[in-house]
Amino acid sequence: MKTRKNKTKLISFEEHLDNEYGKRGTPTRDKYEQEFEAFKLGVILQELRKEKGLTQEQLAKKCGTTKSYISRIENDASDIRLSTLMRIIQEGLGGHLRLNVTI
């Protein structure tokens, strides 16, 4: 019985991104990074809402927006204004927003 050697070379996630979207600073990679950050924001807000035991409708009422807007944010289908994000976090979730900028 012959054994087959696996010739698949493992690469890092960074290398994978370079191969799929180009190096950092290229338009395609920048678009990917921006969309990924929006996705992460939606996931974070959804997790925080669920930790607080709130439905999308309850969160929307607490911060003066609509259930559909909360849903669009959580599902990465809507851009969000900073003022709205702050209101959702402060009034809706009782938290504080801290920003971090990297260059």
Image (cartoon, rainbow, N blue to C red):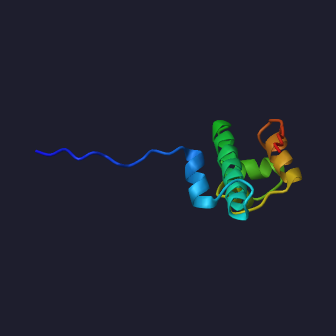
Q: Is residue 56 above or below residue 12?
A: below
Q: Position of residue 65 (x, y in %)?
A: 80, 56
Going by the image, does 16 lie left or right of 52? left
- The residue located at (80%, 57%) in the rendering is 80
Q: Quadrant of the N terminus?
A: top left
Q: Position of residue 5 (x, y in %)?
A: 27, 45
Q: Position of residue 56 (x, y in %)?
A: 68, 51
Which quadrant of the structure image shows residue 92?
A: top right
Outermost residue, right side: 83
Which quadrant of the structure image shows residue 3?
A: top left
Q: Is residue 67 visible?
A: no
Q: Position of residue 96 (x, y in %)?
A: 83, 36
Q: Quadrant of the C terminus?
A: top right
Q: Nearer the viewer, residue 98 or 24?
A: 24
Q: Nearer the viewer, residue 36 or 47?
A: 36
- The residue located at (89%, 51%) in the rendering is 83
Q: Nearer the viewer, residue 12 or 99?
A: 12
